[in-house]
Image (cartoon, rainbow, N blue to C red):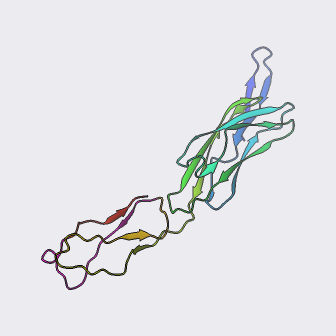
Amino acid sequence: GPKVTYVSEATGVALREVIVDFVVTQSSGEEGTTAAKVDIVLSAGSNKNVTVEYAVTGGTAVRGKNYDLKDGSLTFRPGETVKTIEISIKANGADEPDRTIEVSLRSPKGAVLGGTAVHTYTIMDSDPEPAVTFLTAGQQVKEIAGSVTIGVELSAVSGWDVAIPLMMSGTARMPGNYTMPSGPVVIKA
């Protein structure tokens, strides 16, 4: 990491400050990963303990549903320069958008924050898209039946709204023999 030099006002002597940073600003892994590892580094070893707090400060992932990480702190003992935060990643079996977790460093003791104090981890969805099928292969109704409901279902839960376009074929004609709503059938997430 970059080195910051301060000049002591009392003595005029240059002092080098230890910087605490994430190694990189972003990383990613598939949803099936059991744990994501995010490294935090010091720019130089220190002769005293260095502590830094970390906390989830943003992102689209939901704690407890997509991941588990409690806010906490890390202590670098004298001479240590690398620590790792482990984020437990949960697979939920639903096809959904990729989700992000933003973790920030704060309140360092024995060091100063560098320019990489925020890390964004992306959980890449690895679930297949669900298939859509009719509940029954066909139906027969009398001409005077009124309204008929035709059911469709997904093969798995989806984290997205699924829009299913309607297409008709056969010998019956619209509007003489039937009418139907325009637009796709939407199954909500």
Image-quadrant location for residue 146: bottom left
Magenta stretch secondary structure, dominant: loop
**Residue 140's spot in the image, x, y percent?**
27, 81
**Residue 120's spot in the image, x, y percent?**
60, 47
Q: The magenta stretch spans which residues?
A: 160-179
Question: On the picture, is 143 further left or further right than 87?
Answer: left
Q: Nearer the viewer, residue 185 or 129?
A: 185
| Residue at horizontal 85 percent and vertical 30 percent from the top | 48
In the picture as drawn, the residue positioned furthest to the left comes out as 176
In the picture as drawn, the residue positioned furthest to the top comes out as 10
Whether the magenta-drawn stretch holds residue 119 is answered as no
**Residue 18's spot in the image, x, y percent?**
77, 33
Q: Is residue 3 in sight in this rendering?
A: no
Q: Nearer the viewer, residue 182 or 39?
A: 182
**Residue 90's spot in the image, x, y percent?**
63, 56
Q: Is residue 39 in sight in this rendering?
A: yes
Q: Nearer the viewer, residue 23 or 10?
A: 23
| Residue at horizontal 15 percent and vertical 78 percent from the top | 177
> Quadrant where the N terminus lies?
top right
Image-quadrant location for residue 151: bottom left
| Residue at horizontal 47 percent and vertical 62 percent from the top | 158
